[in-house]
């Protein structure tokens, strides 16, 4: 370990990785190394990366692609929710107004 903290167990350098796209699987280039972290890596994540490092290169790339896509999806979801609060509030007010005016029915999960 380095004196300034643990070194990354998985260091991605600019290389070709696979990721899903509209036309199927295609290759893309990472523009910069992904080595910086904002906080310490958890032990579970460290173990997962250690296990992943034992896989063949093409499987590591596929796993990395999935992980990156999931993380980017979470970021997109968070951004979407953060920027749609006014719309969600308007929809909630309309739903409450419909309920208060008697235009709603109780939800019966058995009838779904």
Image (cartoon, grey):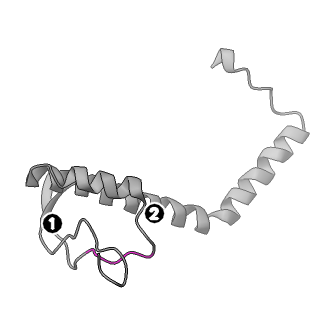
Q: Which mark is residue 111?
A: none
CA gap between label 1 and label 2 equals: 20 Å
The residue carrying pointer 2 sits among few (fewer than 14), some (14 to 19) or many (20 or more) residues within 10 Å by Cα, namely: few
* Residue 84 in the image: above or below residue 38: above
Is residue 21 visible in the rendered structure shown here? no
Give the number of callouts. Answer: 2
Regarding mark 1 in the picture, which secondary structure is present there? strand
Q: Which mark is residue 76?
A: 2
Q: Residue at x 34, y 84 (%)?
A: 3
Along the line of sight, the residue nearer the viewer: 46 or 93: 46
Regarding mark 2 in the picture, which secondary structure is present there? helix
User: What is the magenta segment's predominant secondary structure?
Assistant: loop
Residue holding disc 1: 28
The picture places residue 35, in percent across and down from the top left corner, at: 28, 75
Q: Is residue 109 left or right of residue 49?
A: right
Which residues make up the magenta segment?
Answer: 34-38
The picture places residue 40, in percent across and down from the top left corner, at: 43, 70
């Amino acid at each position: 370990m380095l004196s300034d903290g643990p070194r990354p167990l998985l260091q991605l350098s600019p290389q070709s990785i696979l990721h899903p796209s509209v036309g199927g699987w295609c290759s893309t280039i990472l523009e910069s190394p992904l080595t910086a972290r904002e906080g310490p890596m958890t032990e579970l994540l460290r173990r997962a990366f250690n296990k992943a490092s034992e896989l063949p290169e093409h499987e590591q790339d596929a796993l990395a692609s999935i992980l990156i896509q999931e993380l980017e999806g979470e970021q997109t979801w968070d951004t979407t929710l953060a920027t749609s609060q006014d719309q969600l509030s308007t929809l909630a007010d309309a739903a409450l107004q419909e309920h208060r005016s008697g235009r709603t029915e109780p939800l019966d999960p058995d009838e779904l």
